[in-house]
Amino acid sequence: MTGQTGTDEGDLAYLKRLAAAGRGEPAPFLLLMAVFGGVYGFALLSVIVAFTVEGPPTPYAHPGPISEFLGRWVFVAAHLAFLVALLWTIWRTIGPHRVRLNRAASAVWSAAFIALVTLYASAVLFTRNEPPSDAVYAVHFVGPVLLVLWGSAWWATAIASDRRWLLVVAVSSFAAAIALAYVGNTLWALPIMCGCLLLLAFLPAVLLMRTRRG
């Protein structure tokens, strides 16, 4: 009897752990993700529109008044908005009413973040003895790799949380990584980065927050 009771209690505890692991946010810091993608995405979009009106910048030409104004003050406003969202996120993370993240999401997104930090450190070390004209190419490749990690995190999130529509975000991230690598350090990178911020960060975060409230 005692052995059977112990087994039942162990099974019950195991089921409770499984249930707890599945509860919580499917991705971390959704509000911060939405603010980051939104403010920087729309800021970059405004600069692209200014370039369309005034012409793209050239190495020896002074930028037009619209481009100069937007390039300075719109991004200042974006930095301030992101800072406020970051402070709010820190408070919600360590405060008394902190938002809980489920175990699968914690594993997936923490692994992606650690991989990103490792990648950036590796790129810096790899190019430490290279001239700046060569080292810049390694830095530019961080963007496509970041998109690969971003897509991998969303792919795992889609399957773990049974939100298959997030697979679209994942596959789009992979496609954007290839496109960004293809265009290289050209002006064509701007609309790709703008689309990534708005469609692969801002939009999925907003949709997940709406699902949570619903």
Image (cartoon, rainbow, N blue to C red):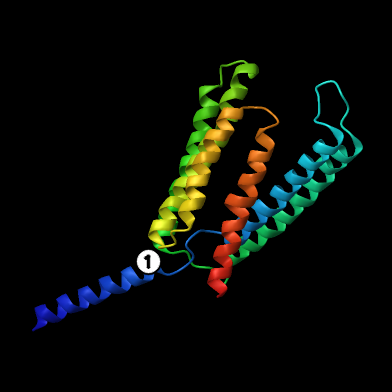
Relative image position of residue 99 (x, y in whole percent): 53, 68
Relative image position of residue 196 (x, y in whole percent): 61, 45
* 165 relative to 129 in the view: left or right: left
Q: Residue at x 47, y 44 (%)?
A: 114
Q: Nearer the viewer, residue 68 or 24?
A: 68
Tag 1 secondary structure: helix
Q: Nearer the viewer, residue 129 or 157?
A: 157
* 35 relative to 11 in the view: left or right: right
Which residue matches tag 1? Answer: 21
Quarter of image, res 13 = bottom left
Is residue 94 at all visible to an observer of this figure? no
Relative image position of residue 154 (x, y in whole percent): 47, 52
- Above-or-below relation of 119 to 196: above
Q: Residue at x 81, y 24 (%)?
A: 58
Q: Quadrant of the C terminus?
A: bottom right
* 172 relative to 185 in the view: left or right: left
